[in-house]
Amino acid sequence: ATQYFDAIPLTWTAAQPGAAFESRLPAWLASDNDVAALIAASWLLSTDQQAPAAEKLRELAMHEDSRIARLAEAQRWRTQHATATAAEVERWRQVVERIPETLRAGPHFLVGQAQARLDDSPTAALTLLRVPVLYPQHRNLAAESLLSAARELERLERTEEAVSLYRELAGDYPESRLTDLAKQAIERLKN
């Protein structure tokens, strides 16, 4: 019920919650507050609580609030990512278009990652670049997206463009744990 709904702390990667945060998540998952349950399910997908988290996401995907329903559906893609077909990823891309624009950062990231896995590098790089361009406020996800897009450009042997993205990551996201990887890639590609 807030204008800042897009700031809810969902995770779109395999990031692990800290111990103190993780200890609160089972109570949130069982909560009557559906946004708290969505947050908890998002973070618990990467833990040994994946099964109850996935079940909660299935329930929330039917929610009357379309924001919650679409985000829950997109979170479920994380469990299907490794086996999704090109047709399924195309369906995901279409679902992203129905998500309110302010909430698309994470879903774009997942679609881009799936496109990359399917060796659709040009499309994957473009999809991934939507995150840092359109949603720079999601700094961790923007940094992850830049790294992934740069790697896709490397696979396409578009070295100069890849180096440009690695430099952007290293320069614009110095707080990111990915900065060292970007610097290493720049050095590797210079040789």
Image (cartoon, rainbow, N blue to C red):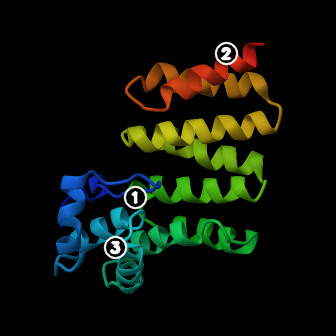
| Amino acid tagged 3 | Ile
Looking at the image, can residue 135 be seen?
no
Q: Residues within 10 Å of mark 2 (few under 14, many from 20)?
A: few
Kindly report the distance in space between the C-alpha atoms of the residues bearing marks 1 and 2.
35 Å
Q: Horizontally, is 79 left or right of 40 in the view?
A: right
> Looking at the image, do the residues carrying marks 1 and 2 touch, with CB atoms under 8 Å apart?
no
Instruction: State which tag comes first along the sequence, 3 or 1.
Output: 3
- Looking at the picture, how far across and down is residue 188, in whole percent? 71, 19
Which residue lies under the disc numbered 2? Answer: 187
Mark carried by residue 103: 1
Kindly report the distance in space between the C-alpha atoms of the residues bearing marks 3 and 1.
10 Å
Kindly report the distance in space between the C-alpha atoms of the residues bearing marks 3 and 2.
43 Å
The quarter of the picture where residue 90 lies is bottom right
Q: Secondary structure at mark 2?
A: helix
Instruction: State which tag comes first along the sequence, 3 or 2.
Output: 3
Which residue lies under the disc numbered 3? Answer: 68
| Amino acid tagged 1 | Leu
Instruction: State which tag comes first along the sequence, 1 or 2.
Output: 1
> Looking at the image, do the residues carrying marks 3 and 2 touch, with CB atoms under 8 Å apart?
no
Q: Nearest to the eye among marks 3 and 2: give it.
A: 2
Q: Residues within 10 Å of mark 1 (few under 14, many from 20)?
A: some
Q: Residues within 10 Å of mark 3 (few under 14, many from 20)?
A: many
Taking the spot 61% from the left edge, 27% from the top edge, the residue there is 165
Taking the spot 74% from the left edge, 20% from the top edge, the residue there is 189
